Image (tube, grey):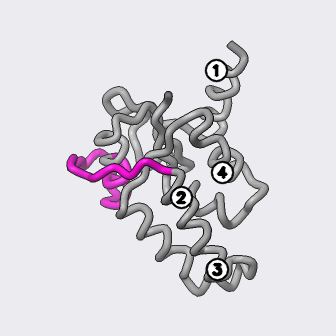
Amino acid sequence: MLRVVLDANLLTSAVLTPLGEARALLRRARVDYELLLSDFMHARLAQVLHYPHIQTKYPHLTSGVITEYLALLRGLALFVPEKTETTASKDPEDNRVLAVAVDGQADYLVTRNHSHFPATYGQIKIVSPADFRSHLQGAQDR
C-alpha cells in the first residue's frame, strides 16, 4: 500500500471545508493509502485550529469538532517518530514534514506549497492534491 504524508495545509483544509478536495483525499486513507503523521504535525495542527482568526472565520470549528478531528487523525494515521534532519526547505516546519516522509518511507508528500519543497526527495514524489488524486484514480482504473 502507498505511504503518504498530507501536508499540514491539507490536514487543516480537511476540517475547515468538509466537502473540499482535502477532505475527499483524507477519506481515502486506509483504503487507497497509509497516512503518515508525526506527533509534531498533530500538535501543530491542534495549535493552528485553535487560532482565534480561524475560529472566527469558521464558526463550525468548535472545540468539540477539533477534538473529534484530532482523534480521527490519531486513529487513522500511522505515527512516525522523526529521526531524520533535513534542510531541503527554507521553512523549518516543512523540513519536519519532509522528515516524516523520509522516516515513514513515504511514496508521496501531498502539498499545495510546492515552492516550499523540491519536486522529489529521494524516492518521495512531492505532488499537488490534484496530481495525487489523478494517481489514485489511475491506480483504480488498472
Contact (CB < 8 A) between labels 2 and 1?
no
Tell me where residue 65 appears, x and y as whole percent.
Answer: 66, 74
Q: Earlier in the sequence, mark 4 or mark 2?
A: 4
First reached walking from the N terminus: tag 1 or tag 3 = 3
* Residue at the spot 31% in from the left edge and 29% down from the top edge: 122
Relative height, residue 38 to residue 34 (above, below): below
The secondary structure type at the circle numbered 2 is: helix
Q: Residue 88 colored magenta? A: yes
The residue type indicated by label 3 comes to Gly
Q: CA distance from mark 2 to mark 1?
A: 24 Å
Residue position marked by numbered label 2 in the rendering: 73
Residue 45 pos. (x, y %): 49, 68
How many angstroms separate mark 3 from mark 2 (CA)? 14 Å
How far, Cα to Cα, is label 1 from label 3? 36 Å
Q: In the image, which residues are magenta?
A: 77-98
Q: Which mark is residue 64?
A: 3
| Picture disc at residue 22 | 4
- Of the two numbered discs 1 and 3 in the rendering, the one whose residue sits closer to the viewer: 3
Location of residue 66 (image quadrant) = bottom right
Q: Mark 4 or mark 3: which comes first in sequence?
A: 4
x and y percentages locating residue 72 in the rendered image: 58, 60
Residue extending furthest toward the right: 19
